[in-house]
Amino acid sequence: QKEVEQDPGPLSVPEGAIVSLNCTYSNSAFQYFMWYRQYSRKGPELLMYTYSSGNKEDGRFTAQVDKSSKYISLFIRDSQPSDSATYLCAMYDNYGQNFVFGPGTRLSVLP
Amino acid sequence: NAGVTQTPKFQVLKTGQSMTLQCAQDMNHEYMSWYRQDPGMGLRLIHYSVGAGITDQGEVPNGYNVSRSTTEDFPLRLLSAAPSQTSVYFCASRHTTGGFNEQFFGPGTRLTVL
């Protein structure tokens, strides 16, 4: 079993749809949970992060962490064509040096 | 700030050739790392460094060498290229102070080994 699992997609939605992206993980020591956005032929960029369990909102984006289920989600409201990208979840703990990434979900938002 | 820079952007090698991928950052970050990204596999850690003179192996280190003589630079060396090393390579850096530290990525190097 991989340490972090993520549905690779691809996922295609119409403009304005609500998008749900998810990851599951196995290491209960993880405390920081991140979502990176990667446009085609570019490096990943941090979208948002959450510490421990709970929700965090930033504009049209909401990140949720459920540590009891080892499950994290990213919701995108009113999706736009400019949201078309690959979304990677990532996580690490306070003692580890290294981030662990999911394989990424490719999202296309169609106008 | 230029952030994290990588050269070259593209490279084609023949099997058995060697080369060095360059990475530099101007944010005075202690931690630097190299990842490879393959379809369906996500980002896999090759080598990392927590400061000048200190390096360690990641998940997929075989066939690669690194060194860290300065805080700014972290080159990745392919000793004898193999087709299995065809991939996109990303360098990243961040601080290692307590709490959350954002990891910044370079633009990537696309490597093809024939």
Image: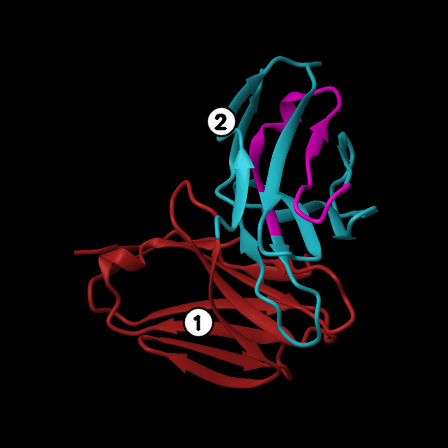
Q: Nearer the viewer, residue B82 or B5?
A: B5
Supply the letter of whichever chain is red: A
In the rendered view, would you say A59 is above or below B48? Answer: below
Q: Residues within 10 Å of mark 1 (few under 14, many from 20)?
A: many
Q: Disc 1 and disc 2: Cα gap in Å?
A: 32 Å
The residue that mark 2 highlights is: B10
Chain B hue?
A: cyan
Q: As drawn, is A72 to the left or to the right of B14?
A: left
- Amino acid type, mark 1: Leu
User: Which residue is disc 1 drawn over?
Assistant: A74
Query: Percent position (x, y) of residue B103?
Result: 58, 59
Compared to residue B96, the image places residue A56 above or below, namely below
Looking at the rendered image, the quarter that the N terminus of chain A falls into is: bottom right
Q: Which segment is the magenta one?
A: B68-92
Q: Chain of mark 2?
A: B
Percent coordinates x, y for residue B114 in the rendering: 58, 15
Tag 2 secondary structure: strand
Q: Nearer the viewer, residue B66 or B30?
A: B30
